[in-house]
Amino acid sequence: METLIALFGHLDPRDLNSRHEFCEILFIAIAASLCGAKNCSDMWRFGQEKEEMLRQVLKLPYGIPSHDTFTAVFRNLDPQGFAEAFARFVRGFAGAIGRNRQIAIDGKAMRGAFETGRQFAPRMMVSAWCREVRMTLAAQPAAGGNEAKAALELLGLLDLKGAIVTGDALHCTSQMAGEIKQRDGDYVLALKGNQAGLCAAAEKLAAATKTPKKGIAVTEEEAHGRKERRSARVIAAPRLGKLHAFPGLVAIAEVERVRILNGKREQKRWLYVLSRCMGARDVLDVVRGHWDIENGLHWGLDVIFREDDCRTRKDHGPENLALIRRICGNTLRLDRKKDTIRGKMMRAAWNDSYLFKLMTQMR
């Protein structure tokens, strides 16, 4: 509880005469979400059923807050301030692995969080995922659906010194590259037609450069009726960055994938811009590692936390509940009990001692 007060206590959006303590509301919201709560009504139901247990650590002078109180708090809580506090909270865990780490940047739409008649424009959160510890380091709301701008703002919440930042072609911009280098990080960014001049120059360089066999890294996998072969090579490109005003660019990488599934052959090829000289095998590892954000974060939010089913849609409610889910995901992954994330959530719902154990990890 002391940790919540220290990190989040200053964020209370309500008047000073509010009845319920803000951090007690936040404590109940996180505990309920660890047990599978999806929205503010679920948090209120959890509080009612677990009041006796909650009073072991909370004062609750006015009882359990109503669902309207939970809703009002999260609708009015400043999501930017909440995101900054969340990033400070996680920074200590990420720092334990040292500087040499990979941070994947990607956005995810909250499919259920849209205004009536605007299903085509759901809210979006952009997250920074640390591959090594498999945790969300920070998350930023994408105002107006502008994922690229939100990603740039997200970098300001991160310690990038020595890290490799990865992103898809949407984030392959000179602004993103410059911000990463300015913060002492490096990048591996997918290159496509949105950077037309740079992409054309990289294609020309790749076509004109012959790489010896020993300079090409290859991996082969076979599982579940699928065969997959990946190859990569790195080509020095010291002039491209200056010619196309792309900060820090020192090389390009070409990655090819051949997949045979149910007798059908599929071949794809990608180009990446690099700000750090690395071997072809390292490039394959980093490119493959970027997609851990899909399997490790986005899949869990959809399938386990059922994020797309949450119909909270007013004001700042969707973004703030999205941050609560990421706090819970980190907490469950930190726990060393051998079980799935869903299994841990079920145990937390059934076993008060285990739930308290999870909450005490938030220190």
Image: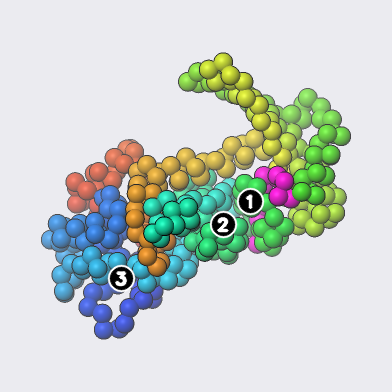
Q: Which residue is mark 1?
A: 170
Of label 1 and label 2, which has the lower sequence position? 2
Callout 2–callout 3 Cβ contact below 8 Å: no
Question: Vertical placement of 335 versus 121: above or below?
Answer: above
Q: Amino acid at mark 1?
A: Leu
Q: CA distance from mark 3 to mark 1?
A: 35 Å
**Label 1 close to label 2 by CB (< 8 Å):** yes
| Residue 72 badge | 3
- As helix, strand or loop, the secondary structure at mark 1 comes to helix
Residue at the image position 36 percent from the left and 76 percent from the top: 13
Residue 350 on image: x %, y %? 19, 46
310 relative to 271, above or below: below
Q: Residue at x 36, y 68 (%)?
A: 75
* Residue type marked 3: Ala
Q: What residue is at 62 percent from the left and 46 percent from the top?
A: 168
Residue occupied by mark 2: 147
| Start-end of magenta stretch | 183-195
